[in-house]
Image (cartoon, rainbow, N blue to C red):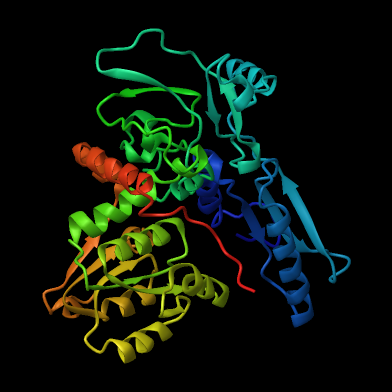
């Protein structure tokens, strides 16, 4: 948008400004800004000053909620200065009830370990979407259990990266513009952390007793270690056992392998008797793979150099690829599949970006598996129990060990 020479009203830019203001109101949690730029810059010096001011403003106002619109233009008297003309576009006023509710939350001070046996509570995501401002607040507790239900006192909860995205307002599921909440698809309303796991960010939860697995009191891992097991190991076992039917002697390429799911994937492959090749983003992580898991071949995951490296040691390709890379690195990885190879996609970016792949790369009877644990548990909840029992058996028999980070010297 740009001011007219003789008027502060620009009819050409007005529809755009109106649209921007509607978006600011509709998507308040995304903290959108409307920046009106003066484009008639006379020399390169003015351009550099203007660009510097624009970048500085964008950085400084990134998380501010009070100023939604700003005009940046050169000072009429001093062309070496950029003038800020700001005005506030007021959002819809909150009701008095909302203000009272917010005031009530601010007065609550809950310490989970201290208060869990005294009063029920759950986590609250602030409007700012800052993780540092996550708070606990009290909630009503169900007094009666329905048949087949059990109440669980929550001690520890594993944090999934999907929960972080939801808390920050970056959930990849799109929201239909100007559509009310009741008309939104179920997944689009999934904005609270833990919503995919029966609301586990509570002090107490009531769940169906069927998927509950009892953990022996003398099982080696601690509560903190156990709470981080289900999501990554469910993903690993479902992918390798139930989808690709991994066999001893097969070769598995695991990308970005030093994460939680990647390390469990290594251990499961080694338990089965499969050969593991891994990629990681730094030499420190690759050193960790060699020392911790005796991975002979660990390559760089940040460029396509791993393709030639793997072809040199395995000219026929690999049997299984467990992928979390995106873009061109995903496409190059597909080319490494051997005859009857399986490509297991754990990433979400290319799925939601509708990335296209060449069918030619799957000509040797290859298969592509997109793994979505949320949908698996929703559509096939019966598969959860046997896998969870396997997890308990693995940990109890010490056939798998707790993940950890390692710093090479």
Placement of 78 over or under 21, stated as above or below: below
Comparing 187 with 97, the one in front is 187
Q: Going by the picture, which residue comes out furthest to the top?
A: 143
Q: Going by the picture, which residue comes out furthest to the right?
A: 77
Placement of 111 over or under 372, stated as above or below: above
Is residue 125 in view from this perspective? yes
Comparing 390 with 362, the one in front is 390
Quarter assignment of residue 312: bottom left
Is residue 173 in view from this perspective? no
Image coordinates of residue 186 in percent, x first then y, are 32, 36
Left or right for 190, reference 70 = left
Q: Residue at x 50, y 75 (%)?
A: 286
Give the quadrant of the N terminus.
bottom right
Quarter assignment of residue 354: bottom left
Image coordinates of residue 37 in percent, x first then y, are 66, 62
Give the quadrant of the C terminus.
bottom right
Quarter assignment of residue 315: bottom left
Q: Residue at x 56, y 21 (%)?
A: 116
Q: Residue at x 48, y 76 (%)?
A: 302
Comparing 14 with 106, the one in front is 106
Image coordinates of residue 136 in percent, x first then y, are 59, 27
Image coordinates of residue 308 in percent, x first then y, are 36, 89
């Amino acid at each position: 948008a740009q001011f007219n020479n003789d008027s502060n009203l620009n009819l050409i830019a007005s529809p755009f400004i109106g649209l921007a203001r509607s978006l600011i109101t509709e998507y308040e949690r995304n903290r959108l800004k409307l920046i009106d730029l003066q484009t008639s810059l006379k020399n390169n010096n003015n351009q550099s000053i203007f660009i510097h001011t624009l970048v500085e403003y964008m950085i400084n106002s990134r998380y501010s909620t009070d100023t939604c619109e700003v005009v940046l233009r050169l000072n009429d008297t001093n062309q070496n200065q950029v003038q800020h003309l700001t005005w506030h576009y007021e959002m819809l006023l909150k009701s008095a009830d909302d203000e009272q509710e917010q005031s009530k939350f601010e007065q609550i001070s809950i310490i989970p370990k201290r208060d869990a046996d005294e009063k029920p509570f759950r986590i609250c995501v602030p409007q700012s979407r800052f993780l540092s401002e996550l708070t606990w607040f009290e909630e009503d507790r169900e007094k009666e259990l329905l048949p087949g239900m059990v109440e669980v006192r929550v001690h520890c909860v594993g944090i999934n990266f999907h929960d972080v995205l939801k808390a920050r307002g970056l959930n990849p599921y799109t929201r239909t513009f100007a559509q009310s909440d009741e008309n939104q698809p179920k997944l689009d309303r999934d904005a609270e952390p833990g919503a995919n796991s029966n609301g586990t960010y509570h002090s107490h939860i009531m769940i169906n007793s069927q998927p509950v697995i009892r953990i022996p009191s003398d099982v080696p891992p601690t509560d903190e270690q156990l709470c981080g097991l289900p999501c990554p190991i469910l993903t690993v076992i479902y992918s390798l056992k139930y989808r690709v039917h991994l066999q001893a002697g097969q070769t598995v390429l695991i990308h970005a392998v030093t994460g939680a799911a990647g390390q469990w994937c290594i251990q499961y492959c080694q338990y089965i008797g499969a050969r593991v090749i891994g990629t990681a983003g730094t030499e420190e992580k690759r050193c960790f793979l060699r020392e911790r898991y005796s991975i002979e071949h660990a390559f760089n995951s940040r460029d396509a150099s791993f393709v030639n490296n793997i072809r040199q040691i395995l000219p026929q390709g690999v049997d299984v690829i467990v992928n979390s890379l995106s873009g061109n690195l995903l496409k190059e990885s597909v080319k490494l599949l051997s005859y009857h190879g399986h490509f297991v996609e754990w990433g979400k970016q290319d799925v939601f970006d509708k990335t296209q792949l060449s069918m030619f790369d799957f000509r040797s009877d290859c298969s592509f598996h997109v793994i979505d644990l949320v949908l698996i548990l929703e559509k096939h909840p019966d598969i959860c129990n046997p896998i969870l029992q396997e997890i308990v058996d693995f940990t109890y028999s010490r056939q798998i060990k707790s993940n950890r980070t390692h710093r090479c010297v």
